[in-house]
Amino acid sequence: MATSPRALIAAVDVRDPLRADERIALLGAKRPRVALPVMTKARRSLPLLDARPIDRATRPRHAVWEITLRCDQACRHCGSRAGVERPHELTTDECLDLVRQLAELGVMEVTLIGGEAYLRPDLLDLVRAIRARGMHCTMTTGGRGLDRELARGLASAGLGSASVSIDGAEPTHDRLRSPGSHRDALAAMTALRDAGVRVTVNTQINRLSLPDLPAILETLAAHGAEAWQIMLTVAMGRAADEPDVLLQPYDLLALFPLLDALAARCDELGVRLYPGNNLGYFGPYEHRLRGTLPRGHHGSCGAGRTTLGIESDGLVKGCPSLPSDAWGGGTIRDHALADLWERAAALRYTRDRTVDDLGGFCRTCYYADTCRAGCTWTASVLFGRPGDNPYCHHRALERDREGLRERLVLRAPAPGEPFDHGMFELIVEPVPRTGAS
Amino acid sequence: MTRLEPCPHCHRHVKITEPACPFCARALAFADLAPRPAPRVRLGRAATFAFGAIAAAQSGCGTDTPRKPDAAPADASRDANTGPDADGDAAVPIYAAAPTTPPNAGDPSRG
């Protein structure tokens, strides 16, 4: 007799990575920092290289564009520490010219993010311009101030879909974001759907939200979400200030069986499950989570190959999540977008990356040639360099088979700037006999 | 880069040149696998993620769901997808919207 997806979820040992007292303490913890950040650092301006054939042949299909860093929330896991707008954000004319350049570069889809994208008064003009250039336009939002009028405006401007962030059941979500934000996010989903905008949901997975995942799925399905993107919270920005909230690499051993059961429930509910690029790699559920990709599995980081990231002052990166200073290729105020894409060393990194660029476990991994340490961002903000990514289900399984586990310990805190990070040490230790975390 | 396929026994991806699964030690026989069909046009994010389901449906051997649980038949019918632009392995950047199928997704020239 077939087992129902709900029964599969119930059968998974959804071990809370936190003890009850730890959960209560974390839910009630005060913010480590209270001041909102303002970007002050001067940006690097490195000379561009000569374009090679591979750089001219490689074209981004998807651009993720932070149109403002201004935000109406100050989420405690926000990698960009959004809140205050950047000092010199692009003007509307500069944005419209960038839309032209994105289309000419061959971008097929533009996702507008923030901060909070709707706090930029010319949002609808940008959506219309993107659509007029033949590109698909989507948006990611916390939904705090996304009312019915704005939803109707977005629909008429041609927004294809909006992804609303839901990071837990109400207590978890409101603790991570702001009081009342869970209620507002659900109201935004309703407003968008009623206006005719297709709605999806994105969820960050951490030690607070992991046990909430089954409840999140039921909630998002009840509010008409068509798809659910899930990704790990990464130790960047404000998330680096609270390392106890982050998953430990060995927590993936409990997470992935749950994801397998949730995938079955998604099928039942008609919700498409999309694992983010930092959720992997190559464990026994890879075929379940990514079986429909052209290769049937994860490949490697797409930053600078299929994806392009833009910050609100025009800085171009291979991926929107990468730290600005180390991974910014230059700004569109100084260079044409195509020149940055083809000739900036920071954007060409993944085009050239080989196994020789990897370190630690990843260098000798069975999947090294295909995976190349997965998400560049996730590893970079832990150790200050990419190439050794402990957030890997295959790796956790292999360590576990040896009776070992990997644990991250914060050794140097983040300085407190947008897209900053601390420095972590990776401890390899025997698995505790009692399963204590 | 050696092509990977899920072991039919333990579902871990293995190189198709392996005589036995390095994870469960069961014997493998991938020698007769057909090549994977490569996309003929650039695929957008939604189309990239739906590619396997589309390929499976067109070949008449897949499921009617977007995800294929147990590998073999449809997975085995696809060719390695090479080239920087065709690398459809990173379809969902973090902090981007989850892809939905755009209204024009049925037109392959639009991806």
Image (cartoon, grey):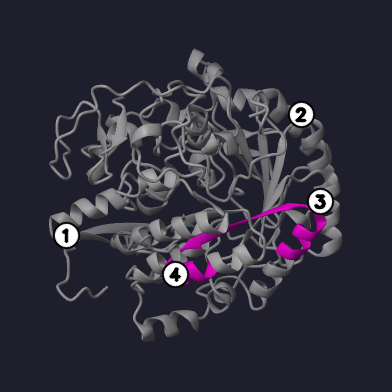
List x then y, in percent, for residue A424: 33, 58
Magenta range is: A189-216
> How far apart in space, not on screen, are marks 3 and 4 (Cα)?
35 Å
The tag on residue A404 is: 1
Amino acid type shown at disc 2: Arg
> How far apart in space, not on screen, are marks 3 and 1 (Cα)?
50 Å
Q: Residue B2: which quarter of the image?
A: top left
SS class, disc 1: strand
- Is circle 3 on the same chain as circle 4? yes
Residue occupying the point 47% across, 23% down: B84
User: N-terminal of the two: label 1 or label 4?
Assistant: 4
What residue did someone put label 4 on?
A: A242
User: N-terminal of the two: label 4 or label 2?
Assistant: 2
What residue did someone put label 2 on?
A: A100
- Is circle 1 on the same chain as circle 4? yes
What residue did someone put label 3 on?
A: A154
SS class, disc 4: loop
